[in-house]
Amino acid sequence: MTPSDHSASAVVTRFAPSPSGHLHVGGARTALFCWAFAKGHAGTFVLRIEDTDQKRSSDAASIGFVKDLLWLGIGFDEGPEYQGQGGGANGPYFQAQRLDIYQRYFEMLLASGDAYYAFESADELTALRAEAKGKNQPFRYTGESARARAPAEVQRRLDGGEAAVIRFHTRAGAITIHDEILGDATLPEGEVDDFVIRKADGFPTYHFAVVVDDELMGVTHVLRAQEHFNNSAKHIVLQDALKFRRPIYGHLPLIFNPDGSKMSKRDKDKVLRKAVAEKGLTSPPVGTVDPLVFSAWLKDKNTQLDLEAAQSLALAIGAVLPEINVDDFRKSGYLPEVICNFLSLNGWSPGGDLEKFDTEFLKKHFDLSRVVKTAAKFDRTKLLAFNLDAIQAMSRDDFIARVSSHGREMHPEFMSKLTDAQFRSLCDASHERSKTLDELFRANTFIITADDALTWDEKAISKHLRGGEPTGAVHLAAARAILAGCSDWSVASLESALKPFAQSLGNVGKIAQPLRVAVSGESVSPPIYDTLAILGKASSLRRIDRCLASL
Ligand code: GLU
């Protein structure tokens, strides 16, 4: 059988994540390319959940993957059923639900002599590996004695409940992998040994399940990360033994940090460790991480805090963890269309100088010939610039709608404390400076802080209230008197009420900064008249009074 067997079929691609953890941006890029390629060829995009490693897989992770893909706008034609997506004639789309299907193919291979039971225990395999290492040779399981075993003996041992795996009998010969992106590569004879296809727990290995499913789901093009390139050799020998069609392969370059390191969870840990060291923390802030876990983590640099613990600690100490997963970018207020645009440029380009395009464009133009072979570098600064541009290009109404939907999901408490009018004013005051949809919430927690709970940044107080001649506090008291007389609390009236006084001081900052620090606690906030208008008269005056009293 040859790849041409698929040539008359409509294109079918698949994204096949293993559901542990969260959808990494690299995985999202694979999904995006698979989707674009299928859509560009009027084909089908399949989502298949590869959950045969039961210990590492979880339903929560599977749902998370589906949600992240849909958030990015990557819908699937076949796959797990979720909110009107998925379903399909080739299901189930969870590998753990396909064990009876795999069993049929195990039996075929056992019957044809292409597979056999093997009974080595983990200890025996370790000893064999050590022996190979001692001889300075790579370990290759060849299984002559296992294959020579009489069928009756095999049956007796299986009936006796002995643990066994099924191994594929790889025949002699070199194996050539054709790859549309990387070109051809030939693995010499002996490189692929008699590998396990069914584990002792009855589950297929990744290699086996992927081959059976790609055939039964009619997958014509396998586009996946380069780390799977060598695995293709195992897939090819299995396809041949099972008389399956051969999909066309395209292995996509990995995505690295600009310094060439892998983009992984470890990046978050590094940032957190640095922030903890800078603050000299020896115990965790209350309510973040279990103190025992924290001290064990501090002692052993090879350990990592779990994601939730890391996030709560980061929040408490003001550390900003780098985004790695799609979900991180979503929480940080990146736009899904920007992520898709940016990810498309990580390993592919439409040619020329064109960099900004949408997924409609990608669908039309994505092709394997322009996928690069070398690793892509994930340039966060550029991503942020893309996000800023997209936000600045939004209409006022769009911006409000999108920030509000982000807020309802990520900051429900903030949203519940603001009236519609306050929220709109805050959006208007923040749009021009927003690089993400999240900044507005992060930067303005002072708005939802109770007036009596507001605290002031010491540095800001000493610079803007204690400093100056006369001091900022003196100007603040004068401004307070003017504000108290304002009956109309709109941005325009506040501005016209305070302007003459500000002008008399020769510098608006002389009253803007003391006022800002007094009502927000910090020296940065939206424009001062907007800030006052959003807070309202009672809150503003109360905060100013408390601030003056605290001096
Ligand atoms: N389950 C594999 C992974 O998550 C997918 C491999 C493939 O696409 O064949 O890496």
Image: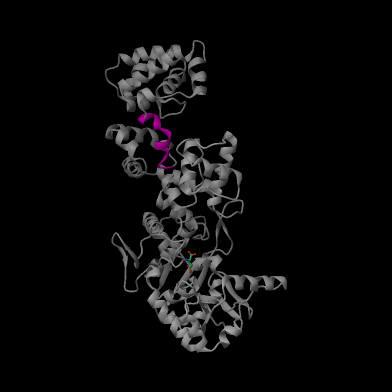
Q: Position of residue 13 (x, y in %)?
A: 42, 70
Residue toward you, 226 or 93: 93
Q: Is residue 119 visible?
A: yes
Question: What is the span of residues highlighted in magenta in the rendered image?
Answer: 436-448
Residue toward you, 157 or 259: 157
Image quarter of residue 545: top left
Seen in the picture, residue 299 relative to 125 is either above or below; the reply is above
Q: Residue at x 49, y 72 (%)?
A: 205
Q: Position of residue 324 (x, y in %)?
A: 50, 51
Q: Position of residue 285 (x, y in %)?
A: 49, 35
Q: Residue at x 40, y 69 (%)?
A: 96
Image quarter of residue 212: bottom left
Label tally: 0
Seen in the picture, residue 512 relative to 223 is either above or below; the reply is above
Q: Residue at x 49, y 84 (%)?
A: 156
Left or right: residue 483 compared with residue 20: left
Q: Position of residue 307 (x, y in %)?
A: 48, 48
